[in-house]
Amino acid sequence: MDLIEPFSPDAAVARIDGALTGIASRQLRAGTDSEVLAWPGAVIVTELRIPGAVTARHRPAELVSLYQVWTAEVLEALHDRRARHLGASGDRVTAVYATPAQSDVAAVFDLAARANTLRWVVNRALRRQTREPIDAGIGVDAGPVLTISTYQDQNPAVETTVHFGEPITRAEDLARIAGQGNPEPVWCGADFVDQLDRGRRRLLAEAVDLGQEADAYSGHPVDDELWSWAETRSIRRAG
């Protein structure tokens, strides 16, 4: 039986001490080569929903193919020069963008609308092969994104970059809410909506109080180009 590699708790404590000491002594200066720990960002999270009845009827390999199809196309649709992270885990796709300007926030909204419209494109392809349609919830929020880089002592050339922060957590929560059979599949946090221009804000409904001083706005924004493509192929908006 293969053994896992050893892990030293003493070495872990030493690494943690060093990291915390470094953070305490680090002074960030704008315009220098110092490591930037926090930056303005926006996050899109999509959460795939496959009905239980569909899951029960299909073999695991067929279900895997549905996840692969959706994940691959969402990652393609969310690709953008502003993206700092694009990744997938299970039924969830997460995209983190740098949004230093209002125009960047507007672009992230448009990307969320594209992901929403993508459902019709994917479902059309599925119907061509007599497969059941899929659904997805989409959560979007904005705020300070934190980034850390870690290195392995055994291989200093290997760097792991991790993004985290409240916008990511909130976008995940909103995607989960949006995917629970809501007629409005896109849910946006108040911090994100506050940075949108008037035209895009009009595409969202009034705020919903989620408790804990958190408001969210829901809507059904679509990508005009993708939607025109869908309409020419007689895809019902109910998707």
Image: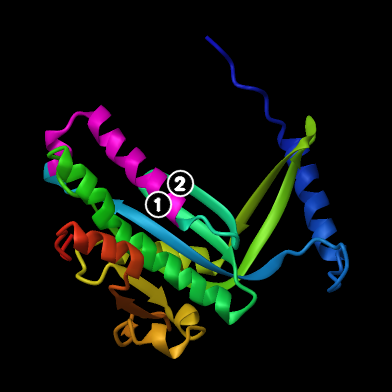
- Would you say residue 109 is visible in this rendering? yes
The answer to whether any part of residue 210 appears in the image is no
Above or below 138: residue 150 = above
The spot of residue 76 in percent (x, y) is 45, 50
The crowd level at tag 2 (other Cα within 10 Å; few <14, some 14-19, many 20+) is some
Answer with the quarter of the image where residue 39 lies: bottom right
* Residue drawn 33% across the image and 82% down it: 203
- The residue to which callout 1 is attached is 74
In reply to whether residue 66 is colored magenta, the answer given is yes
Residue 136 location, quadrant = bottom left
The residue that label 2 is drawn on is 88
Q: Is residue 210 left or right of residue 53?
A: right
Q: How many marks?
A: 2
In front of the other: 121 or 50: 121
Does residue 33 belong to the magenta stretch? no
Give the magenta range.
54-77
Between 13 and 160, the one nearer to me in the picture: 160
Question: Which residue sits furthest top?
Answer: 1
Front disc: 1 or 2: 1
> How busy is the neighbourhood of tag 1: few (under 14 within 10 Å), some, or many (20 plus)?
many
Q: How is the image coloured?
A: rainbow
Give how far across and how far down residue 24 sits, in percent: 83, 64
Q: Do the numbered discs 1 and 2 sit on residues whose CB atoms are within 8 Å?
A: yes
* x 73%, y 46%: residue: 150
Residue 228, which numbered label?
A: none
Circle 2 — which element?
strand
Q: Give how far apart the Cα atoms at labels 1 and 2 are.
A: 10 Å
Query: Is 185 displayed left or right of 181 in the figure?
Result: right
* Above/below status of 137 relative to 156: below
Identity of the amino acid at label 2?
Ala
Q: Secondary structure at mark 1?
A: helix
Which SS does the magenta portion mostly show? helix
